[in-house]
Structure formats: C-alpha cells, structure tokens
Amino acid sequence: MASQPSPPRPSVPPSASAPAVPYVLPRVLALADDLSGAAETACALGGPVRLSLTAADVADSAAAHDLVVDLDTRHLPTAEAAHAVRTALRAATQVGPARLLYKKVDSQLRGHLAAEAAAYAEGAEAVVVAPALPAAGRTVTGGVVHVNGIPLHRTDGWRAERAAAPRSLPEALSGLPVRTVPLDVVRSAPAALDAEFLRIADSGAHPAPDAETDADLDAVAAAALRLGAGFRLLGSGGLALALGRALIRPAAVTHRPVPAQDHAPLLFVVGTAEPAAVAQIAHLTMLGARHVPLDPADLAAGTVRLPCTAADPALTVLSIDGSAGLHPGTGRALSAGLGALAATYPGRPDLVLTGGETARTTLDALGIRELEPLGEIHHGAVHSRTPDGRSVVTRPGSYGAEDSLLRIAAALRPRMAAAPAAT
C-alpha cells in the first residue's frame, strides 16, 4: 500500500512532565485477528462501540462510535492475512473522518504477527508494539514476553502451533525493525519517553516498550497519543484498556442487565486445547451440566451428530476430547466442526464460546455478523448481544481460572448456579 501522509504531530511538552489529562481524539478503528480478541478490545475501549464480523465495515464512515472489526485472519495463509490488513487500512483511509488505528494481537504472539504487523506499519510514522497483558500474567521485560514470570518460549503456550514460540519481540517481528524500550525509560518523565519513541522512529524502526503493569501501558498509550496519529498502536487487550482509559468520549449506552432466561438452553462450546479447560468443565458438570466430549477425528471429518440426550433444555457443554492428544495445525478444522455442530443445537440457545476460532466459526454457521458488547463477566469473558437478542459470551481459550465457566454460567443463569448451594 502506498504510504499515506501522517497527520501533523502535536507538539511535545518540553517539560519533564506532561499534564495528567485524557486526550480527545477521533474514534478508534481496531483490527483483530480473531473474534475473542475483537470482543475483548471492544469492551476495553469503553465508549460506544460496534463489533463487526464483516471486514467491509472498516469503510463505515460513521463517527458516532468506535469500530472493532474481526478480520478473522488467524487461520489464513500468511500472505492472505497480511493482504486482509492492507485492504482494511486502505478502505479505512479512503472514507470518512480520520480514525485512531489500533491493531489487536495475541499476548502470546500467536498468529501471523510479523506479516500483519508489517502490513499495519505501511504508511505509519511508527508502530508502538506493546503486547503485555498484566491482568493475565503476560509481561514484557528486555523485549521478552513472560507468562507468569516464565519466558514465553519456555512455556507450553505454543503447543498447538506448528512452530516454536519466539524468544523475543524482535524475533517474533522478523522483517520489521523494532527497538526495545527498557522499563526505566517507560517509567521516566513523559518527555523522555516521547523523545525515545521519536528517536527510534527517526531511525526507521518501531518502538517496543517493556511493560509489567497497567501503569506502564498507560504511559505507553499516553506517549503514542501525544505524538499523534502517525504513531499507531499494536498490542493485546492490556494496551486497549490503557487506550480506553486515556480517551475522552461519550460514555457507552448503559443497558439494563439482560434478564436470565432460565427456560432457554445454555450451550457452552469449548474449543480450546488448554489443559485448564478440563477443570473448568468439571465445575459445570458439578452444577448438573451435560458434558458431550467429541472425538477430534470425527469432528474434523464432520461426521459427528449430537445425541438426542444432549439437547438438554438447561445446560450443555460441547468439547473436544483431547485425552489422546491433538495434532498441531488441526485447530481450524476442529473449530469449524464445533461451530457447525453448535448451529444444529435445538431451542435457540444462548452461547458461551471459548477460543477465538471456535467463536467465529460458530457465529458464522449461525449467520451472525455483528455483536453489541454489554460488559465483561470476568477478565476476557465478554458478554454481548446479537441483533435478535441472543446472549453470546466469548472468551480466549487461554484465559480464566478453574471457575471461569462456572462464573459465566452464574452470570447468565443465576438461579441455576445458586441451586446446588441451597441443597
């Protein structure tokens, strides 16, 4: 994509400190590579927001809301994923008022990070790369992503991927020149952080600041905003939260809580390979949920059919039986199988969908193209409403404590969740 001229940069205060006030800027356009990340970002931004599953909606020129679009690129070949980002940026810059750009990426650097970041950087003065997510124990120190204090490449976070986890952000962003910014600079005076970002940009590289806390991410977001829209933001839900805290926009419309529909089915579709999912499902079965584990080979082949007894009007859990292990690279086929199966579930259930691919394939199978985020049940578990009033909760597969699914069930069906306690 041809380079676009950067908007004028606001002057950077020469003093050692910057005014501690939020910034009033154009609406945000956020691009995500999977649906659970898109929902997390939409909730994090905090203002009136539209969450779209249609890439063409980036050309929406309405200025009344932020727009988060799931480009659904995680499963695409690398070149196609990069092309989707370029196409979205081109459409966004050709119509309507300028929007502040945000690229949502996985906090464990999964997906086509290098290719999509390179496409996102085209036409930018610089991209500020900050994937830390302190709320989930993901931090960045010395340019290395850590998960609960352990370097990412020493964890099993990439066990379902075809490749090994990168050892650092520069390695993960191979082909895009990045320069790490140490914590002492992130935590220095605002003018010093601004100057470091400018120095890196002037060298033709992109700043990748370390961050261990939400306050670190607040400093990073504030610096990027002070430097103007030529500095684009790329990060996880942690940086999106920092951006939401920094921006002054009209408050989101406050909705009354969605009434619990205890008479309607509640269907959990667990598409994650995370070991924690086993314990999370066990909490639901103790609540009385019917658990239907599905053979991965049959699921990928599309030969699974729900048993008649699975159509329980109360609560059902569909999951992948991983007892024999899962083959790396089969995630999309398994998610598609789960989505197709969930779409056949009778009774128009409310949905709880774990894993971004599973969420997307399920909603695609149901023909749902837009969600209205209502709020978070817990970190990363975003409660949304479909245009026809159905509740949908999306959650990244790697999130949540053992009681995550139980907490979601309690939020959607409080009387059902309270029943065991009364016995």
Image (cartoon, rainbow, N blue to C red):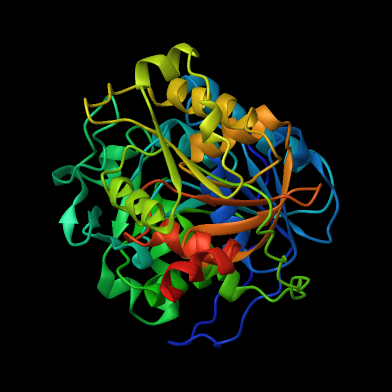
Confirm whether residue 276 shows in the render: yes
> Left or right: where does residue 175 sit relative to residue 222?
left
What is the tally of numbered marks visible in this picture? 0
Nearer to us in this view, 12 or 326: 326
Looking at the picture, tell me which residue is in the foreground, 8 or 117. Answer: 117
Name the quarter where the C terminus is drawn.
bottom left
394 with respect to 91 (left or right): left
Q: Position of residue 334 (x, y in %)?
A: 43, 24
Quarter of image, res 12: bottom right
Residue drawn at x 72%, y 35% as measured from the top left: 54
Name the residue furthest front.
Answer: 423
Quadrant containing the N terminus is top right
Q: How far across and how far down the image is residue 390, in percent?
A: 72, 50
Residue at the location (75% across, 35% down)?
91
* Whether residue 227 can be seen here: no
Residue 102 image position (x, y, % from top left) = 58, 52
Where 421 sits versus 173, above or below? Answer: below
Residue 152 place in picture, x, y as percent? 21, 48
- Above or below, 26 against 188 in this view is above
Taking the spot 23% from the left edge, 34% from the top edge, the residue there is: 159
Q: Is residue 125 above or below residue 332?
A: below
Q: Quadrant of residue 139?
A: bottom left
Residue occupying the point 52% across, 20% down: 305
